[in-house]
């Protein structure tokens, strides 16, 4: 503990000295041009590797011979392990198979452009030799820094080196609150000011010791002892050490749950961080975001987690994220010996083979120009990329509302030229009889200028017959409003609220009506009604757990008798004493038969 005491004292002295020299500047106040320049590499990258590695890789999801539910890196909390027991893992951490050059090679071959690794997770264990604590890799049999060799290997491979750092710390004597499962721990002295000095000293070590970093990825900001003012202060402190660094929104208190986007206000943070989900649509230009997602169900290595996503799922997830203007941060959880599980490597290698052919449709592209399209699309000046997952029945991909003149089209796989023509008065591209890629086949459509598409009123899909009505497209009456962060019509605090649409129907008939909604626990039990023509269907809302956890509910069936424009409306009634009704993302009419 001598190292700890010396470190805390050193941190306090360093903080006093730094306070006299650090610029009194709010780095949130940069110009749009300055911010765009700083974020340029991040927007270009589109694909990165998340690495969760620490002492928790040793038990690998099991404690005292029993499996522990939940994600692997939270085992200290999930199994309620006292620090005195958990610290014994230090003597067993010896990753003799660790090869940072191999890790960088795996990321590079997958088509990734940056690496984010857990320098310190919630358990407080540090992967570098920190002067501020003895609870680090220097106190293990391995005995030396794990991060700097990875930083050097990443840069040698052309990757940006980035670090995750947990604000929450289950082992530090000054962190407040003390973990509930370890309430009898001796030596706990809650003092968040002292803990912040410790954090700042460690962050200075990392920024000055690892060379220029691309991102500082904070986490663990949700406990009430971490405040907005502390978040802004930490953001400015980090930017004062390296003004070009990018800092995620978990440095502050503005993150809206797992949906990850930042609430309106003066919150610090450069980009949103959806977790284990992809937003239902993109955001306006200048709103940056990154979905962090696991390949199986856990972040840290857990030996009994075999719920692996398929290669097809992962590639389509990358396409989905890029089509909405975001980045995908895909996780690996190395084993205690320093190797990345073969299931992860196999999937990354397969993604790399796809990226070798199709990277130009991902890296450096921006979001789709279409409000709605059957397939995901990305774009860059002069080219629209259509990511085809299945061949349409007629063999043509339509480009409804495209405002650019189409010059030519080709497959990225093999470069085969494709016929350009029209379907239903819209530009279209004819596909080959067999698509060359079972995951995603990319069609590159050369156009004049930056691809754009004209806004159009809601219309029935002529091929599937589905009517899809987004919350953003609705006319809102009463106190309703569209919320970009959840891509839904929010609050519904009054029973007078109503959402209305006018939709062009080309295939009348009988339809099943469903809604996509989210409902907080306190609002469980309200009712919603959708009306078309003079028919109404309704249903009772059940809680989905939160305002960003969406599910679908079938309300019933109704008939649209003829071709033409028809009005659709949605309204509801709260349960008595409930604060709100729901968040409504969409109404869908699904054909079930003829008129």
Image: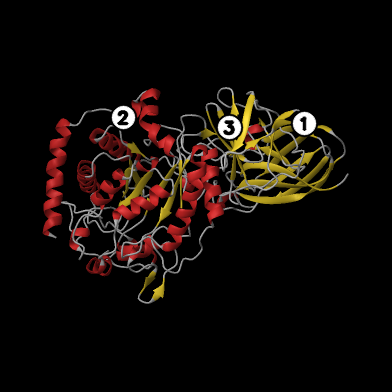
The residue under the point 64% across, 23% down is 405
Q: Nearer the viewer, residue 486 or 177?
A: 486
Of the two numbered discs 1 and 3 on the same chain, state the one appearing first in sequence. 3
Q: Position of residue 91 (x, y in %)?
A: 22, 68
How far apart are labels 2 and 3 at the CA level? 36 Å
Which residue is label 1 attached to? 424
- Residue 169 appears anywhere in the view: no
- Element assignment for label 3: strand
Which residue is label 2 attached to? 27
The residue under the point 68% across, 51% down is 553
> Which mark is on residue 302?
none
Q: Which quarter shows the C terminus?
A: top right
C-beta proximity under 8 Å, tags 2 and 3: no
The residue under the point 49% across, 50% down is 353
Q: Quadrant of residue 424?
A: top right
- Colour scheme of the picture: secondary structure
In the displayed structure, 453 sits above or below 433; it is: above
> Which mark is on residue 384?
3
- Viewer-side label of 1, 2: 1
Q: Nearer the viewer, residue 235 or 581?
A: 235
In the displayed structure, 176 sits above or below 401; it is: below
How far apart are labels 1 and 2 at the CA level? 52 Å
Q: Nearer the viewer, residue 548 or 294?
A: 294
Q: Which quarter shows the N terminus?
A: bottom left
């Amino acid at each position: 503990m001598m190292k700890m005491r010396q470190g805390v004292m050193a941190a306090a002295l360093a903080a006093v000295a730094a306070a006299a020299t650090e610029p009194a500047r709010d780095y949130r106040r940069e110009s749009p041009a300055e911010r765009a320049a700083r974020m340029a590499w991040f927007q270009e990258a589109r694909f990165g590797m998340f690495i969760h590695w620490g002492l928790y890789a040793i038990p690998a999801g099991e404690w005292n011979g029993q499996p522990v539910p939940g994600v692997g890196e939270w085992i200290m909390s999930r199994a309620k392990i006292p620090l005195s027991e958990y610290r014994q893992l230090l003597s067993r951490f010896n990753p003799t198979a660790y090869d940072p050059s191999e890790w960088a090679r795996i990321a590079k071959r997958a088509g990734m452009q940056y690496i984010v690794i857990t320098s310190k997770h919630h358990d407080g264990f540090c992967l570098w030799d920190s002067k501020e604590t003895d609870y680090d890799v220097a106190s293990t049999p391995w005995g030396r820094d794990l991060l700097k060799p990875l930083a050097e290997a990443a840069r040698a491979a052309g990757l940006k080196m980035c670090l995750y750092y947990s604000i929450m710390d289950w082992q530090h004597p000054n962190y407040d609150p003390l973990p509930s499962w370890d309430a009898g721990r001796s030596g706990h002295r809650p003092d968040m000011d002292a803990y912040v000095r410790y954090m700042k000293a460690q962050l200075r070590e990392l920024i000055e010791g690892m060379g220029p970093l691309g991102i500082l990825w904070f986490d663990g900001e949700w406990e009430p002892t971490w405040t907005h003012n502390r978040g802004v202060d930490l953001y400015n402190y980090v930017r004062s050490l390296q003004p070009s660094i990018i800092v995620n929104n978990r440095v502050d208190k503005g993150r809206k749950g797992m949906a990850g986007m930042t609430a309106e206000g003066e919150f610090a943070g450069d980009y949103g961080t959806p977790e284990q989900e992809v937003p239902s649509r993109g955001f306006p230009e200048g709103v940056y975001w990154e979905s962090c997602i696991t390949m199986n169900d856990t972040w840290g290595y857990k030996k009994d987690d075999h719920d692996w996503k398929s290669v097809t799922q992962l590639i389509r997830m990358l396409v989905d994220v890029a089509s909405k203007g975001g980045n995908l941060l895909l996780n690996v959880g190395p084993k205690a010996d320093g190797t990345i599980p073969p299931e992860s490597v196999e999937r990354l290698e397969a993604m790399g083979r796809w990226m070798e052919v199709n990277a130009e449709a991902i890296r450096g592209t921006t979001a789709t120009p279409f409000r709605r399209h059957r397939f995901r699309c990305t774009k860059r000046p002069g080219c629209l990329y259509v990511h085809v997952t299945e061949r349409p029945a007629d063999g043509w991909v339509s480009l409804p509302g495209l405002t650019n003149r189409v010059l030519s089209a080709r497959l990225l796989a093999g470069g085969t030229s494709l016929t350009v023509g029209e379907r239903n008065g819209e530009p279209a591209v004819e596909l080959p009889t067999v698509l060359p890629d079972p995951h995603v086949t990319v069609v590159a459509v050369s156009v004049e200028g930056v691809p754009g598409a004209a806004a159009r009123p809601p219309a029935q899909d002529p091929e599937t017959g589905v009517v899809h009505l987004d919350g953003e497209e609705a006319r809102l009456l009463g106190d309703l409003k569209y919320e970009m962060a959840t891509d839904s019509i929010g609050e519904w605090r009054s029973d007078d609220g109503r959402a209305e649409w006018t939709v062009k129907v080309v295939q009348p008939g009988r339809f099943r009506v469903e809604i996509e909604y989210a409902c907080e626990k306190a609002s469980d039990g309200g009712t919603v009604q959708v009306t078309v023509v003079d028919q109404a269907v309704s249903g009772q809302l059940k809680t989905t757990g939160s305002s960003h956890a969406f599910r679908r509910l079938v309300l019933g069936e109704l008939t649209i008798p003829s071709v033409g424009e028809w009005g659709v409306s949605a309204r509801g009634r709260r349960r008595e004493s409930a604060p709100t009704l729901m968040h409504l993302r969409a109404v869908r009419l699904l054909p079930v038969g003829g008129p």
